[in-house]
Amino acid sequence: MPTSHDRYPYSPITARPVYDWPGGRRLAVYVGLNLEWFSFGEGLGAELAPGGPQPDVLNYAWRDYGNRVGVFRLAELFRALNWPVSLLVNSAMYDHAPAAVAAFPNAEIVGHGRTNSERQGTMSENEERALIADATAAIVKHAGRTPKGWLGPWISQSPCTPDLLHEAGYTYMLDWCHDDQPVWMKTRSGRILAVPYPQELNDIPQIIGRKREGTDFADMIVDAYEVMRNECETRPLVMGIALHPYLVGWPHRFRHLARALDHIARKADDKVWLTTAGAIAAHTAALPEGTVP
């Protein structure tokens, strides 16, 4: 028999109770903007091109552009669109690039580990507990509020990550990309909500993994929106868009991202909720028991 994680049972989306987002809306759209810091000369990191021996200046400097330039281009766009943002923040950003985080003063802050140069899923339980505590403490210190949501660096989890997050006070996580609606997941001391986070509408898998460029990525965003806007008449849905400033903050990609987001903003009607991951989680948690699988 195949093994099971036993975190949630199988549930077809067509067999679930129907509910609304606030104001009778049916499609919740949010942006998860990843603000990430990478160690110089060591550790993990996305690559523009195959890297040479460390220090890999080509790829390090390419990623650093996002925190120095691209992120501010994106901040101006979201202000112009009046679009709320969920910031997925490596806590090292507060030490190395604090102005990048400060460019989004009204954003929701989501825990995203210490740095994307490491994976929490390879750590011991005590090491992982310490990572979560370190990242949380830095956000509380600098943002003045306790984060409720978490996305692991590289979407990496150990077998006990949901348990540790729940025990640390987190109420939702984004790592499990298995649904278009929020889903409750079991932990050893309660439950935690899985809010849909995109692996397809995500610039790393598309631009780095599949070698697509900004035009294709923007068209994917528009196409997904049109399909989900129609489908939400039948059931509530969540559409996430995952972005990284060192990818879509470059001018030639930014132009197309702006086109796609403007399309959504202009066509957002009384069925569409432009929101944050945290607002989705809070509304879901307040629904009557048994509404959400």
Image (cartoon, grey):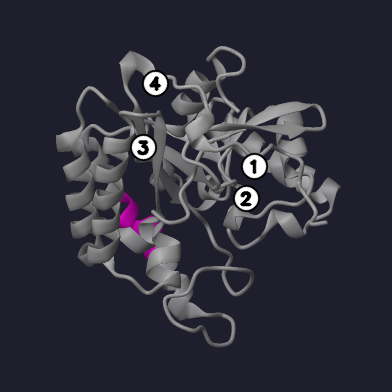
The spot of residue 227 in percent (x, y) is 29, 44
The percent position of residue 247, horizontal first and vertical second, equals 36, 63
The magenta region covers 65-73
Asked if the magenta segment contains residue 88, the reply would be: no
Count neighbours of disc 1 (C-alpha within 10 A) and say few if under 14, some if 14 to 19, many if 20 or more: many
Q: Which residue bears the numbered disc 1?
A: 135
Query: Of helix, strand and loop, which one carries label 1?
Result: helix
Camera-side residue of 262 and 66 = 262
Most frequent secondary structure within the magenta stretch:
helix
Task: Say what secondary structure mark 2 lies in.
Answer: loop
Give me the C-alpha separation between circle 1 and circle 4: 30 Å
Q: Earlier in the sequence, mark 4 or mark 3?
A: 4
Residue 175 appears in the picture as rendered: yes
Q: Secondary structure at mark 4?
A: loop
Distance from disc 3 to disc 2, alpha carbons, whole Å, reads 19 Å
Q: Are marks 2 and 1 in contact (CB under 8 Å)?
A: yes
Determine the residue located farthest toward the bottom in the rendered image: 52
Q: CA distance from mark 2 to mark 4?
A: 32 Å
Q: Quadrant of residue 77?
A: top left
